[in-house]
Image (cartoon, rainbow, N blue to C red):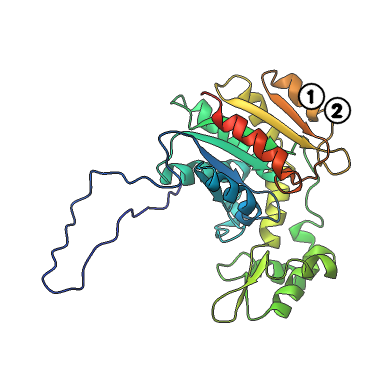
Amino acid sequence: MRRVAALFGAAAVGGAAGLVTNKTPSPVVLASNVLSPHRPTTVLVHGLDSSKETWNGVLAQLATAGYPAIALDLRGHGESPLGDPKGFTAQQLAEDVIDAVRAHGVDDCVLIGHSMGGRVAMQAAAIDGAAGNRPLFRSVIIEDMDIRPRALASPPDDALPPSSAAELLRFTSSGGRRFVDWPSARDALLRWYNGDVARVESWKRSRVRPLPGGDWWSDLNPAAQRLARDKVLASEDGASSWDTLASLPVKVHLWYAGAEDTVCELKGKGGIEDMARRVPTAQLRHFAEAGHSIHNSARTEFMEALFEVVDSPR
C-alpha cells in the first residue's frame, strides 16, 4: 500500500491583535520552480550510495535556464528514512517516486534515473504507463544502467558475524546515520567499504556532512545499499519493466558512458544491444568520453541532450 506524504501549501497568518486569519483554501494555484505551464518537470533519481546531492550541478543549470526540476532521495538514502526493510523492493521504490512526484502537484515529467536509479526509473515509468491513465512521465532517461541481474550482497545478512549484524542494524533506525563527530561516522562506514580510508575520507563534508549543533549526518547507508543490491540490482525486475516499456506511449532514452567507465555490458543478455532489440523505439546515446556519472563527468554534453528531450513535443 502506498504512503503519500501530505503537503501543506500555505502558512496561516496570525499573532498580531486584530488580524483575521482566513482559513478558506485559496482557489489560486501559485507558480513555483517545480510547476510550469510551459515545460515538463525533470525528475532526477540518484544511484547506489548516492543522494539527490549528485544532481546539484544539473539542478543549477536547469534553474538558470528556467526549467522546473525535482531531485529525490530514495528511501534509506540521503535524507529519506529507510522505513521497514521488509518493504524495500524495486516496486516500492518506484511507487515512492510516483507518489512523491504527484504529491508535488506535477503531472507532466521527464524522468531520469542514474545507475541503480535507472532500474527504479524503468519500473516507475512502466507502472505509471500501464495504469491506463494519461502517463505522468512523457519520457524516461536511463543513465548508464543495463538490465543484467547483479550479484547479491556478500556475505548475506544471516552470515554476518554478530558484531557486524549489530552495526548494520544501527543503520536501519531513524537516527542511525547521525553521529557525534566525523571520526565516529568514518569508523562506522569503513567496515562496509572494505576499509578504504581514502574513499571514505573523500566523503567528508559531502556525502557525510556536519549538522547545526555539531553532529554529523551520513547520506550513505550500508543497510540501504545491501537492500538495493539484493532487491533492485540482483532482481529480474529491470528486465520485466524494460520489456513493459516497449508497449507503452512513453519515449525511452538509453544513455551509456565510455567503455572504460560504464557499468553496462554492450553485448549479451541484458546488455545495451539486447535492450535496443527488446525496445526498438528506445533512443540510444553513447557518451564516449564520459565516466559512469555522465551528468557530472560530461556535464555540457549531458545538458545539451537533456534539453533536447525536455523540449521535444509530447
Image quadrant in which you'd find residue 241: top right
Q: In the image, 274: left or right of 210? A: right
Label 1–label 2 contact, CB within 8 A: yes
Which amino acid type is shown beneath numbered disc 1?
Answer: Asp
Q: In the image, 105: left or right of 47? A: left
Compare residues 242 and 304 and report the one nearer the observer. Answer: 304
Rendering coords of residue 297 (x, y %): 76, 47
Q: Which residue is mark 2?
A: 268
10 Å crowding of disc 1: few (<14), some (14-19), many (20+): some
Can see residue 146? no
Q: Which residue is mark 1?
A: 274
Rendering coords of residue 290 (x, y %): 80, 42
Q: Residue at x 72, y 70 (%)?
A: 204
Vertical comparison of 206 with 58: above or below: below
Q: Secondary structure at mark 2?
A: loop
Rendering coords of residue 267 (x, y %): 86, 28
Compare residues 155 and 208 and report the one nearer the observer. Answer: 208
Q: How many marks?
A: 2
10 Å crowding of disc 2: few (<14), some (14-19), many (20+): few
Can see residue 185? yes
Q: CA distance from mark 1 to mark 2?
A: 7 Å
